């Protein structure tokens, strides 16, 4: 059964999230106060409605307690609305509330009123883009929480022809290789410790953030 995700707020972040979740097979209910945004989202989500999510009666009618997760993606223009909406969602028994924060004070308040997870899309994107700008061999990275990153990097010239045993990445850099992308199709492979790496391979690694520059500079 598909996951049912309720998204409140269809700014750039909320709209992008709604589209991506829909493409991945989730049943998405998307709402906003702006009719134009709702009409745009209606082209790809399961259901899109014009409502004011700070109106307790309107929000309750959509049964947030029956959704797998609710994302309060209300943007920078209304911190008060995001706080009220998050508090109402907690009161109504939503099982997982993810709220968008604009700053540290906003984040603390959202935690206090009941958010299970806090996100700051601009801050997260800035961190990821900084790594790609500084370390050109980083293709993508994703936070796993508690300073752990899942990162995809290009195999460095000095790695080609060597095995993971030869490179000893866990001991030298605190890096664990969990998969390899190989060939023109970039097929994902389970890493074999004794097989030599090839030019064009990408490594999927798990590490803390500080290990990335050490790895790229040290191999």
Image: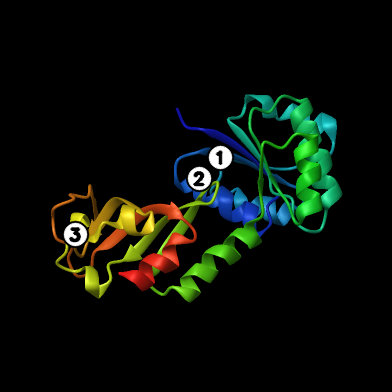
Give the colour scheme of this rendering.
Answer: rainbow
What is the C-alpha distance between the residues marked 2 and 1?
Answer: 8 Å
Left or right: residue 51 compared with residue 159 = right
**Which comes before the other along the chain, label 1 or label 3?**
1
Disc 1, SS: loop
Disc 2, SS: helix
Q: Nearer the viewer, residue 30 or 65?
A: 65
Q: Is residue 101 visible?
A: yes
Quadrant in the picture for residue 219: bottom left
Quadrant in the picture for residue 15: bottom right
2 and 3 marks in contact (CB < 8 Å)? no
- The residue singled out by tag 2 in the image is 22
Left or right: residue 161 compared with residue 127 = left
Q: Is residue 94 above or below residue 154?
A: above
Residue at 28% x, 62% y: name it: 202
**Place of residue 129 in the rendered image (x, y in percent of width and height, measured from the top left):** 53, 68
The crowding category of the residue bearing disc 2, from other C-alpha atoms within 10 Å (few below 14, some 14 to 19, many at least 20), is some
1 and 3 marks in contact (CB < 8 Å)? no
What is the C-alpha distance between the residues marked 2 and 3?
Answer: 43 Å
**Place of residue 20 in the rendered image (x, y in percent of width and height, measured from the top left):** 50, 50
2 and 1 marks in contact (CB < 8 Å)? yes
- The residue singled out by tag 1 in the image is 46
Left or right: residue 174 compared with residue 143 = left
- The residue singled out by tag 3 in the image is 166
Q: Is residue 190 above or below residue 96?
A: below
């Amino acid at each position: 059964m598909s996951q049912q995700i309720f998204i409140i707020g269809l700014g750039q972040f909320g709209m992008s999230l709604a589209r991506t979740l829909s493409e991945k097979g989730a049943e998405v209910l998307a709402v906003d106060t702006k009719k134009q945004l709702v009409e745009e989202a209606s082209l790809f989500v399961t259901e899109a409605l014009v409502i004011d999510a700070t109106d307790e009666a309107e929000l309750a009618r959509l049964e947030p307690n029956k959704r797998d997760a609710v994302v309060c993606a209300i943007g920078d223009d209304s911190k008060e609305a995001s706080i009220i909406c998050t508090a109402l969602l907690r009161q109504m028994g939503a099982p997982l509330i993810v709220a968008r924060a604009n700053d540290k004070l906003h984040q603390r308040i959202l935690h206090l009123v009941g958010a299970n997870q806090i996100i700051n899309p601009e801050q997260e994107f800035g961190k990821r883009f900084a790594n790609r700008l500084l370390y050109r061999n980083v293709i993508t990275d994703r936070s796993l929480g508690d300073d752990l990153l899942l990162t995809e990097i290009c195999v460095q010239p000095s790695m080609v022809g060597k095995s993971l045993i030869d490179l000893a990445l866990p001991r030298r850099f605190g890096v664990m290789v969990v998969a390899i992308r190989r060939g023109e199709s970039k097929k994902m492979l389970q890493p074999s410790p004794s097989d030599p790496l090839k030019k064009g391979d990408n490594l999927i690694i798990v590490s803390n953030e500080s290990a990335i520059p050490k790895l790229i500079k040290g191999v």
